[in-house]
Amino acid sequence: MAAHFGRRLRKGAATTAVAAAAVAALAASQAPGVSTDDAGRQTTGADAAPDATGGDGTATGNSRYYTDLPPLDSPNPSPTTGTTPPVVTGDAEAGIPATVLDAYKKAEASLRDSKPGCNLPWQLLAAIGKVESGQARGGRVDAGGTTYSPILGPVLNGNGFANISDTDHGLYDGDSTHDRAVGPMQFIPSTWAWAGRDGNGDGKKDPNNVYDAALAAGHYLCRFDHDMSVQAQMNASILSYNNSTAYLNTVLSWLEYYRKGTHEVPDGTGALPSHNSDDTSGASPTPTPPAPSRPSPKPSTPKPGDGGSTSPSPKPSTPSTPSTPSPSPTPPTPTETVDHLEDADTAKLTATAGDTFAQKIAVRTETKAGKAVAKVRVRFTIVGDATDATFTGGETVATVVTDSAGKATAPALVAGEKTGDFTVRATAVGRVMAGLDYTATVTPRQADTLTRTSDTALTCVPGGEFADQVEVKATYKGAVADKVAATATLIKSADDATENDKGPYFKDADGKTVRTLTDLTTDADGVLKLPKLYADDTTGTFLLRINTTGGATLTVELKVAAATS
């Protein structure tokens, strides 16, 4: 397995033959920028040397990894004579277990914030995860993303691999003599000591947790300021994970495949690879110890009978080979027992634009018998683009693990500026079943009071312009009413709110007369400052009426009179 950093492993002849056959078949369609040389080997056309520019100067060597390849674009690839190519799998390979996929995407989002120049695609993590552990053995992880049992690479005792003495006292790999690669992304303990990350926020750095391991792999690939959008730098990062051109080409093939499209499958149902780089017989990179066989009993020799004669000894029968006992069925995970989602008394969801919803969505995971199921991941998703609402923190998707009562409560919703209804959908991660849809409503911002910010009289001479601009402040229940929609109209009279056809006026961008302004909005302080007002030749007292969403109204008096001598 890869991530055996700091030691060079020895490569078997089988690895070379298998990888050569596989990558030759893929040359035309799989890995970006890959070509084939005269010997049928793949080259990248970019820097294929391991990254040795950093402070630690580490490389994995040619350690064990899965060599199964994604489906080929050409229907019938021709294998190299005399070799058995790795299995080329079908469309099921496009499915990635839900929790594992979530971990890759969260790692990409985290790196986008912390190392934006790396441009790490989650599909690269998926490609490495596929090659290293078959996506955590097809997604055999619990609700928190931890594998049900450790995924361990071979013992690094010098027998076909590097000889790496124990560095973690067996803490991660259970071996206090030699090190072994650990977890879905296959880090050896000495590398995990500095590369480990806490990807799920539980305060621990666990190589057996797919969230922690995916984030650690992302940071490992992005170190030395590598940019994954530059092919040579991506190649160097992959080779620093496992220093093998065949490994590089296998990872690039899966990267290209996943970039063409993937889909989520329930945890534990992912396709499992069957071939690895030092054993083409189909053995798993993590062999299970064989069940101990029971010794066959010796045939007994009959004793002489009472009559003094001895019966001829029967020929002992050949003992039948004891069959290997079938493994005990794996108990279902909590997620696998979930039959449906039930609403957990969610109140009506309503908020004013820009405000946080006072109500939160809560659901309960239950078995068919209605029993609550704890430790199940529930995903809450804001559906569609009809709203700009988010959860606290700015995300449109939030995943929560159910508590001991089987209840998962979504983070608070924050209303955007788009008003109207939108949908939040709750689904059980790793289960194919109907979700629950919740309707949330965003109402416009409101004001119930408008006041002028100045008491200066607004006067003008005929044909002139008003010296002061009208400025008002909006409040709602005594608080500043920011971003509230408003209109301003020069009306005929207090009893007739229709637009006046004479007297003061505004100008539009072309200098034309305008007596009604729409699409006005108060600023962050609730203040609205209107454009300049002008007067025609009509004298008298005129009215300007301002209205806001929520019912606030203010009428302002304007006077046009000839100048006094």
Image (cartoon, rainbow, N blue to C red):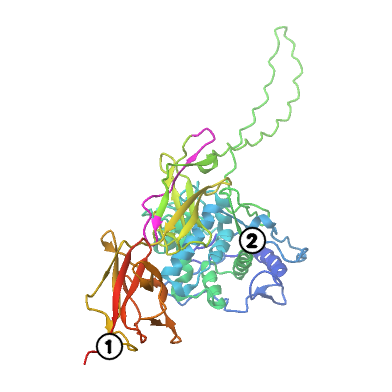
Q: Is residue 78 left or right of residue 92?
A: right
Mark 1 is on which residue type?
A: Ala
Secondary element under disc 1, as helix, strand or loop, is: loop
Residue 266 at x, y percent in the picture = 57, 49
Residue 97 picture location, percent across and down? 57, 53
The residue that disc 2 covers is 67
Main SS of residues in magenta = loop
Amino acid beneath label 2: Thr
Question: Mark 2 vs mark 1: which is more N-terminal?
Answer: 2
Q: Which residues are magenta?
A: 351-370
Front-most of residues 58 and 164: 58
Residue 562 marker: 1
Q: Secondary structure at mark 2?
A: loop
Task: Give the number of callouts.
Answer: 2
- Residue 355, magenta (yes or no): yes
Q: Position of residue 4 (x, y in %)?
A: 50, 63
Q: Is residue 318 above or below residue 124?
A: above
Task: Determine if the magenta segment contains residue 477.
Answer: no
